[in-house]
Image (spheres, rainbow, N blue to C red):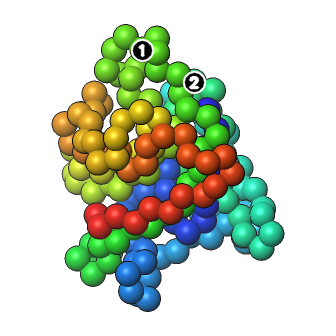
Amino acid sequence: MKMRILPAAFLVTLAVAGYSAVTTACFKQFTFDEPSPLDRWDKMILNGLVDYKVIKQGSNGYVDALSEKACSALYYKIGFRLKDYPMLSWKWQVKKFPDKRKALTDKERNDYAARVYVIFPFLSFSSSKFIEYVWDEDLPVGTEVKSPDGKNIKTIVTRSGKGVEGKWYAETRNV
């Protein structure tokens, strides 16, 4: 599965980042046009390593993720008052969706072309709360999916359908 995410706010997994599209106040904006931009990001390998690389497109860069039955995440820890910066924005593009036709279990069906997480840390990772914004090929936008990975994960379909090849889609959510 191949996914592209543009630098406005790249988040495959992120411990809360804020970017306000409504006002000019911006807590943190992630760009990928400087040398070695992923060096400040941490990786979490869950089931095989996704191939992440930065692709330059003119003066901008974006993260390209290629996954072959792998599940890992890039994340950037950041702390701030969510009340002060409640908006999150990002751009993404998907080239290929996972084939769920042979999925037999909820865990196997819990596969999306792209995900953006907001993590609210607690005492341990397993007791943290998560919002997971996903791009699914078939489920309608706004659908909330029960995660087989835990009741502390709220999964929301943010984009649905294949989209236009080569087009970037911008999202803004009030976390």
Residue 101 versus residue 32: which sits nearer the camera?
101
Image position of 165 with respect to 138: above or below = below
For label 1, the residue is: 103
Image position of 104 with respect to 155: above or below = above
Residue furthest to the front: 164
Residue type indicated by callout 1: Ala
Q: Position of residue 60 (x, y in %)?
A: 72, 69
For label 2, the residue is: 69
Q: Residue at x 36, y 36 (%)?
A: 139
Q: Quadrant of residue 136?
A: top left
Q: Residue at x 38, y 28 (%)?
A: 110
Image position of 21 with respect to 97: above or below = below
Question: Which of pointers 1 and 2 indicates the residue nearer the eye?
Answer: 1
Q: Is residue 171 visible?
A: yes
Q: Position of residue 8 (x, y in %)?
A: 55, 69
Tell me if mark 1 has few (under 14), some (14-19) or many (20+) residues whose alpha carbon lies within 10 angstroms of its own: few
First in sequence, mark 1 or 2: give its number: 2
Residue 147 versus residue 40: which sits nearer the camera?
147
Q: Quadrant of residue 39?
A: bottom right
Q: Residue at x 46, y 20 (%)?
A: 100
In the image, taking residue 56 as reference, residue 147 lies left or right, namely left
Residue at disc 2, secondary structure: loop
Residue at disc 1, secondary structure: loop
Residue type indicated by callout 2: Lys
Q: Position of residue 57 (x, y in %)?
A: 78, 63
Tell me if mark 2 has few (under 14), some (14-19) or many (20+) residues whose alpha carbon lies within 10 angstroms of its own: few
Q: Position of residue 101 (x, y in %)?
A: 46, 15
Image position of 133 with respect to 99: above or below = below
In the image, taking residue 107 as reference, residue 43 lies left or right, namely right
